[in-house]
Amino acid sequence: MNPQRRSKTELAARVARDIFDGAVVNLGIGQPTLVANHLPPGREIILHSENGILGMGPAPAAGEEDYDLINAGKQPVTLRPGGAFFHHADSFAMMRGGHLDICVLGAFQVSATGDLANWSTGEAGSIPAVGGAMDLAIGAKQTWVMMDLLTREGRSKVVERCSYPLTGIGCVKRIYTDLATLECTPQGVRLVETVDGLSLEGLERLLRLPVLPVLPVTGA
């Protein structure tokens, strides 16, 4: 088995492809911020940042950074025409009020039924606080996770039950990884697609979990 892993850029483009026209989307700190650079042309997608931006654009070109205009991860960003920035209390009111269609977050673990652990591994030296992740994970209409499927030690980050402190319960709808795209259901993870060179059986061996097959496409 020699699967063709997606690069971080390819993974960001894959996530961006599934964001529907007119969506209001929050991109979490880390890998998810790359999605802003790959939004399909001709599709109106409004990006929100929890530090108080609506209408955020892609990363600026080298030499054009404005460090008074940054996202929640302190990275310089751009502002699209009509964009706005405001107090972060208003931004959290948007998050908690159900005004975000999608949030894309990183994760340490995701359970087969959609529990999310993305703020701490419970070990000394790990991130000291959850930040806005709980508000995003529960407040958004859909929560997607973008991450590598395996840890550096080769263990699956998709697990039967999370062993790390939870961010949210049953909140994750989709998991986008370098090896496969999965959907979380009450019955367990369902396959959406794998990369070339990875079979369903091979994926199950990596996860050490059963994976529901792709849903058949029904025609009119």
Image: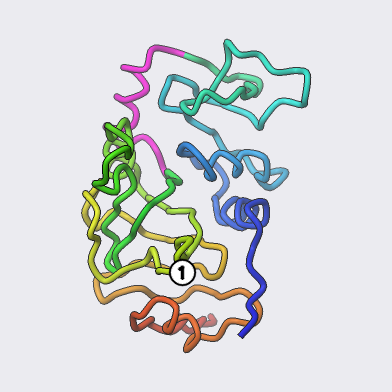
Task: Report the magenta residues as a range.
Answer: 86-101
Q: Which residue is mark 1?
A: 154
* Residue 52 location (% of width, % of height): 44, 19
Q: Residue furthest front?
A: 124
Residue nearer the viewer, 60 or 205: 205
* Residue 122 location (% of width, % of height): 24, 46
Q: Is residue 115 above or below residue 38?
A: below
Q: Is residue 217 above or below residue 121?
A: below
What residue is rendered at 48% in x and 84% in y? Answer: 216
Please, which colouring scheme is shown?
rainbow
What residue is rendered at 68% in x and 47% in y? Answer: 40
What residue is rendered at 56% in x and 54% in y? Answer: 15
Q: Is residue 124 magenta?
A: no
Residue nearer the viewer, 45 or 3: 3
What residue is rendered at 31% in x and 17% in y? Answer: 89
**Lateral position of residue 51 relative to residue 187, left or right:** right
Residue nearer the viewer, 16 or 4: 4
Q: Secondary structure at mark 1?
A: loop
Q: Quadrant of the N terminus?
A: bottom right
Quadrant assignment, res 90 = top left
Q: Is residue 66 above or below residue 1?
A: above
Residue nearer the viewer, 163 or 12: 163
* Residue 176 location (% of width, % of height): 50, 60
